[in-house]
Amino acid sequence: MSQHTTRRRFLVAAGLAGTTLLAGCTGTTGSGADTTTTEEMADDGMTDEEMTDGEMTDEEMMDDSTPADPMSAPRAEIDRFSDAAGTLMVRTDENGLPEPDEAVDFDQGPFITQGLGPDGEIVRYYNFDVQSTTPAPIYALFREGEDTPVEGQLNVIDVIPGDDGYNDFWHVHKVTVPEDYEANTVSSLADIGSAGYEMEPTDILVNCPVVPDGSTATMRYGDEDAGLVEGWYQGKVVSYFQFTEASLTLSGGNVPLSPIYVAFNVNPGEDGGGPASGFMTEEGSDQTHNVVATVPGDTGYSPLWFVSIYDNAEFDSVSDLDSATSAEILASGAATVNCPVVSVM
């Protein structure tokens, strides 16, 4: 465990029909869940003698349904920069992006950008690469009759960077478990399905990029904790950041978008142009003239940005949203990128 990593065992603080999706911060010991009953095993052709002759004892069956311990569970390997996971940020011999499962310092380039707000204010935002408008599901567990998640239970996802359907943006699903459920008996979506627990989709979205353990991104727009959060992925533990600068809800089943206008050192369509050339900046500075249309607190703010590229010949004349929208647009909707705003000055 990295000394600078804050360990937390809860997902998000977000409303769910007037409740708070906030789970506790303790783990329990044991192994993964198995909801197979004795009767089902008999139906599969296993005799009572076979279940007690050393192949499957009552004690072993009980062990299979005891909680898992996140502290001793295996961890999933995370790589955000593989060909399968990355779009704008794909590892090459030249760019030196971190190796698979290597902790990432997102407080340095190319992961942090200084741009402009709609009124010309200076803003800073992280770059978490292209993300789809289709969120991935995340599962939070609630005991019957309770309106807060099971204390100590890690939330469950079924995709990580590089998997089909992965997204930094997660659609929260409420899972109802029995009153006597023990935290972390479930450690995968398969466990939830095997147990037959009721799943209810909400309209809540959360922005939680899955990253290698030990990664850091210390800036937040508000005073929320910048430490890593832990979850379950197919019986393994994963780490992710949580950005809560704005409450997010589904928009027509999708992640909402907000515009951003950017300029590159070389215009797209020219040799070496577009993202590969890097954002244009003021001389001797890291200040871009990338302009976001909204900031946290504005109606319509979203960290998923709808990217339009303007002609870099107009870089000096772009200083706010009005001047950005007046510039010559070379490409509209070039990508949708996850760039949570973490500072407005």
Image (tube, rainbow, N blue to C red):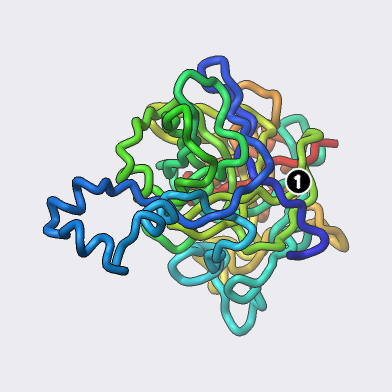
Task: Give left or right: position of 199 versus 150.
Answer: left
In this rendering, the answer to whether 326 lies above or below 132 is: above
Identity of the residue drawn at 77% across and 41% down:
225
Tell me the element at label 1: loop
In the image, what residue type sits under mark 1? Ala
Q: Nearer the viewer, residue 240 or 296?
A: 240
**Quadrant for the N terminus in the image:** bottom right
Q: How many marks?
A: 1
Residue drawn at point x = 82 percent, y = 62 percent: 3
Task: Identify the residue at horizontal 13%, vertical 51% (top origin).
Answer: 43
Relative depth, front residue between 25 and 95:
25
- As drawn, 285 above or below 292: below
Outermost top residue: 18
Find residue 245 and report its image quarter.
top right
Residue 133 appears left or right of 197: right
Q: Quadrant of the C terminus?
A: top right
x and y, in percent, of residue 56 in the image: 31, 62
73 relative position to 58: left or right: right
Q: Residue at x 20, y 53 (%)?
A: 41
Residue 287 x/y as whole percent: 80, 52
Q: Does any portion of residue 20 appear in the rendered image?
A: yes
Above or below: residue 261 compared with residue 284: above
Of the pair 281 and 151, the residue shown nearer to us: 151
Q: Which residue is mark 1?
A: 226
Residue 196 x, y percent position in the rendering = 30, 37
Residue 65 image position (x, y, % from top left): 42, 49
**Location of residue 2 by image quarter:** bottom right
Circle 1 residues within 10 Å: few <14, some 14–19, many ≥20: some
- Residue 326 visible in the current orientation: no
